[in-house]
Image (cartoon, rainbow, N blue to C red):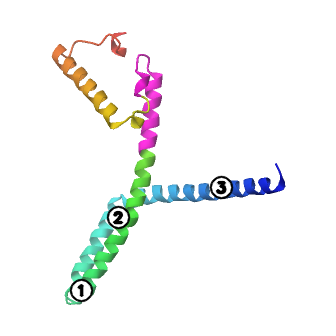
Amino acid sequence: MNKTQVEQRSNREQERDFFCVISDAFRVFARHSAVMLGSAWAFGGAVFVILVWILTGPTFHFSDTWQLIINTATTIITFLMVFLIQNTQNRDAKAVHLKLDEMIRALKGARNQLVDLEDLSDEDLKKLEEQFQRLRKKAEHDGPHSRRVNSPASR
């Protein structure tokens, strides 16, 4: 590689590192925010703010500005919370998927085709759902004491 290519590669690595740092910082911030904002104290604080706003209504003659303050504040908070919640939900869902994938791989007799179901098309998921519904109906029909041949309990 020549000098220019080395500099370009170094710049790409620094940019990636910068984005990784930002991503990690946001992840930590989102996790801590979700814990704090999902608490009873945060809910109590929100109720308190609404009560203060309502009680100040007569002082400001229930003006358009008085209403605009709460509308703007709640809109901004809601907008930002969507990103925090989505980030936290995406990470949690990914972690659950990985844990379930590991359990499927570890269980003898489990169908490894069920790993990474989230990548299937909607049509394939619908077919699989119908297959499980048929299995459930068959199990209900066979009674609670019947066991599948491949189930871990029957080994």
Mark 3 residue type: Asp
Q: CA distance from mark 1 to mark 3?
A: 47 Å
> Of 55 and 143, which appears nearest the observer?
143
How crowded is the residue under tag 1: few (<14 C-alpha within 10 Å), some, or many (20+)?
few
What's the magenta region? 93-114
CB contact under 8 Å: marks 2 and 3: no
Q: Is residue 112 highlighted in magenta?
A: yes
- Relative to 109, residue 83 above or below: below
Q: Is residue 67 highlighted in magenta?
A: no
Q: Position of residue 152 (x, y in %)?
A: 37, 15
Name the secondary structure under disc 3: helix
Q: Position of residue 30 (x, y in %)?
A: 46, 58
Which residue has dot 3 on it?
17
Q: Position of residue 20 (x, y in %)?
A: 60, 54
Query: Number of labelled discs?
Result: 3
How crowded is the residue under tag 3: few (<14 C-alpha within 10 Å), some, or many (20+)?
few
In the picture, measured across the screen, residue 74 lies left or right of residue 80, that is left
Q: Which mark is residue 42?
A: 2
Mark 1 residue type: Asp
In the picture, measured across the screen, residue 90 lies left or right of residue 20, that is left
> Of 54 and 90, which appears nearest the observer?
90
Quadrant in the rendering for residue 82: bottom left
Name the secondary structure under disc 1: helix
> Of 122 and 57, which appears nearest the observer?
122
Mark 2 residue type: Ala
Identity of the residue drawn at 64% across and 59% down: 18
Which residue has dot 1 on it?
64
Q: Main secondary structure of the magenta part?
A: helix
Identity of the residue drawn at 25% across and 20% down: 135
CB contact under 8 Å: marks 1 and 2: no
- Relative to 133, residue 119 above or below: below
